[in-house]
Amino acid sequence: MNEIKGINITENASLKNLNTYKIASSAKYLIRVETIEGLINILKYLKEHNIKYFILGAGSNIVIDEYFDGAIIKLDGLNKVAVKEQTITAWAGAMMGILSCESVNHNLTGLEWAINIPGTIGGSIVGNAGAYNKEMFDDLISIKVLDENLEIKEIKKEEIKHSYRHTDLKGKPWIVLEAIFKLEKGNKEQSLELIKERKERRLASQPLDMPSAGSVFRNPENDHAGRLIEACGLKGKTIGGAMVSPKHANFIVNAGNATSNDVKNLIKLVHTQVKEKFNVDLVLEQEIIDWK
């Protein structure tokens, strides 16, 4: 495996700094991919040797378990972002913030909302990330994926079923490699002002100084999950090292060495109490990754 070019392998690797909850976790192998050829060759190897694997983006919006007896694959090296007129081509490993900055720097508008999304392009496509009533598929034209036969294919946006924070890519054995967006012409100064205003609002209302994975639950129609959770008296509620943020009730934060079970049990408690008090079945926005 170490002879494969275009990859870098670490054995018994810590994942604590590779998930935004900062949950202490580890994997038998951590594989950082530098080239598409390297990705294809390592996938062939893993399949031939019956080694399970998981593609990990930026580790945001997920709750991971403590140990994975397989290979965690990071597409770190596939991080190019290229702008040509009003079209942006972004590789799967590029961060959303870079994509947003590049668009603004080229006087394009439509991706200002993505500046603070702590995710990669690939993960954000699969989960149809969004904010401020915008989402990935608004400006998406097409994607390239590596399919189950390890062949590269292009897929138009119209061929992908998508909805709020969901796509049917989640159920397919494909790996997103690249995405193409078409944006409107904009004004850099206006975009920067919009970004500044939103940043100030986030700093004032969200617990950005503590490890979390963003909003835990989707907002119910005509209501806010945070309001319902706060009305249950759950602000500051803790299980182990996990805590419902005193600053924003729809955030669970790692207040000190939280385990995945701490986070999952607190999510379950919040969901149960909101259901009992308001008869509202909150929908989980974060994804619980069960490697077992």
Image (cartoon, helix red, strand yellow):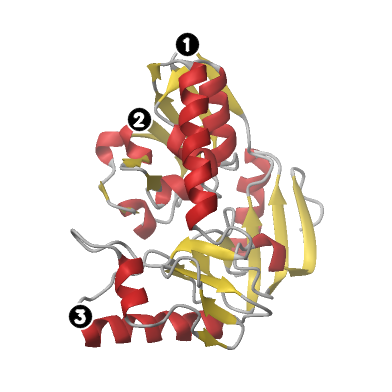
Which quadrant of the structure image shows residue 282?
bottom left
Dot 3: element = helix
**Rendered view: 99 above or below 42:** above
Dot 1: element = loop
Q: How far apart are marks 2 and 1 (CA)?
A: 14 Å
Q: Distance between the residues labelled 3 and 2?
A: 37 Å
Looking at the picture, which amino acid does disc 1 mark?
Answer: Glu
Q: Residues within 10 Å of mark 3 (few under 14, many from 20)?
A: few
Residue carrying label 1 = 85
**Rendered view: 120 above or below 9:** above
Say which of 127 and 281 sits in front: 281
Taking the view exactly as shown, the residue that stands out farthest to the top is 85
Mark 3 or mark 1: name the one nearer the start of the chain: 1
Mark 2 or mark 1: name the one nearer the start of the chain: 1
Residue carrying label 2 = 139
Looking at the picture, which amino acid does disc 3 mark?
Answer: Phe
Mark 3 or mark 2: name the one nearer the start of the chain: 2
The percent position of residue 176, horizontal first and vertical second, equals: 48, 44
Give the mark toward the camera: 3 or 1: 3
Residue drawn at the location 56% of the way across and 65% of the way down: 212
Dot 2: element = loop
Residue carrying label 3 = 278
